[in-house]
Amino acid sequence: MATVAELVEDIAEILSEKPETVNAYARALIDSGDLPKSRGRSIAQVDYRHIVKLFMAVILSPKIKETAESVEEYYNMRRPGVGPDFPSRLQDRAGGQLCDFVQVIHAPDGKKEEALRRKLVDSKIVFTINWPEIEFDFGHGKLMRFKEGGNSSFWEGYHRRCVILSGRAFLMLGAGKGRDYVVWESAEE
């Protein structure tokens, strides 16, 4: 697994962002407990949740002191029309879906997931900045949308300010540097 410092370096490179900026977001997420903190000789390792949260922070580009709030808002978005009173099995959150997305890209489990991986690598994830919404576009008209409030079937604002991220961005993590972002579970567990 990679460390937070390595994740910062990779995300800065992938998103063409200054490492100092990505590091500032990482520091804010460490302070809020959303990224692991190294202690002494114990170097903290990142998991899929940490990867997704730091990507979100850089993409959303909030003020540094608002980083944890902004990331949490997008990470915990539900599908349109799903309220807090729905059963827990219907409470899919955007962050959980993104973590699953990254995990399939990095560690496909079997031939079925390998075929899915190829599709996910070519998909787009649209983050709407001025109205909390995340939309996964898997091509061929297949969409998955997470949105808070408003009409669930379309976007209601005048100006849609968004960032589009390719599935390939997640595939590029650690590329060429020999970093392993995959947690391999032992057969004994």
Image: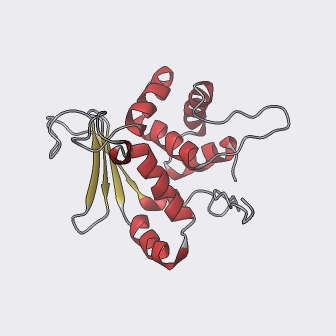
Picture residue at 50% right of the left edge, 64% below the top:
105
- Against 85, is 108 above or below? below
Percent x, y of residue 14: 52, 52
The quadrant the C terminus occupies is bottom right
- Against 63, is 10 above or below? below
Picture residue at 84% right of the left edge, 32% below the top:
40
Residue furthest out toward the front: 87
Percent x, y of residue 188: 75, 63
Residue furthest out toward the bottom: 111
Within the image, what quadrant is residue 157 found in? top left
**Mark count:** 0
Query: Relative to the observer, which residue lies in front, 123 or 158?
Result: 123
Colour mode of the rendering: secondary structure
109 sits left or right of 42 in the view: left
Picture residue at 62% right of the left edge, 62% below the top:
175
Picture residue at 18% right of the left edge, 36% below the top:
159
80 sits left or right of 37 in the view: left
Percent x, y of residue 118: 44, 72
Percent x, y of residue 167: 43, 60
165 sits left or right of 50 in the view: left
Query: Relative to the observer, which residue lies in front, 34 or 81?
Result: 81
Residue furthest out toward the right: 41
- Against 51, is 115 above or below? below
